[in-house]
Image (cartoon, rainbow, N blue to C red):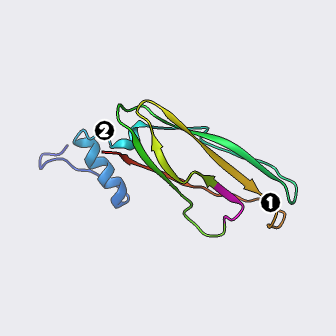
Amino acid sequence: ITPQGIEILAGTKTELMAAYLALLGYSGGPGNCLGIDPAFLGHSLPTGGSVSDTLTLSNTCPAPLNFSISLPVQGLEWLSVLPETGQIPANGSVSITVSFDAANIWPGNYGGEFFVLVEDSV
């Protein structure tokens, strides 16, 4: 806070917007209701091997949340997520299957990420 007003320093537009919203007391949208467990999945697979894990999306809000899952980059054929869309019940959860398949990739270390987007179902 300066004599001329409030000064917000940020390195990017996104950081500036986040600081501005925090200043106004904005607590966020439906993303604040979303829980993801576990936050990280990892495996060591032999060539041609595959494995699946269960990821739990939970909703702590009193209203259902619609979700969609996206892979942000091409070239992640070894990674799949099902279902890609759906609804998490109010104060409930859904299970997501995350599969890793090393059948058609060269030996090596691979990494990837996917995004879970949520919105109110209303």
User: Residue 57: horizontal and vertical position, in percent?
Assistant: 53, 39
Residue at 40% x, 36% y: name it: 33
Q: How far apart, in angstroms, are the residues tagged by discs 2 and 1?
A: 41 Å
Disc 2 marks which amino acid? Answer: Ser
Q: Which numbered disc covers residue 102?
A: 1
User: Residue 41: horizontal and vertical position, in percent?
Assistant: 68, 45
54 vs 23, nearest the viewer: 54
Residue at 69% x, 65% y: name it: 77
Q: The residue tagged with tag 1: helix, strand or loop?
A: loop
Q: Badges 2 and 1: C-beta atoms under 8 Å apart?
A: no
Q: Is residue 111 magenta?
A: no
Residue at 30% x, 53% y: name it: 17
Q: Is residue 77 magenta?
A: yes
Q: The residue tagged with tag 2: helix, strand or loop?
A: loop
Among the two numbered marks 2 and 1 on one chain, the one whose residue lies closer to the N terminus:
2
Residue designated by label 2: 27
7 vs 33, nearest the viewer: 33
Q: Which residues are magenta?
A: 76-80
Q: Residues within 10 Å of mark 2 (few under 14, many from 20)?
A: few
Quick check: 95 above or below 18? Answer: above
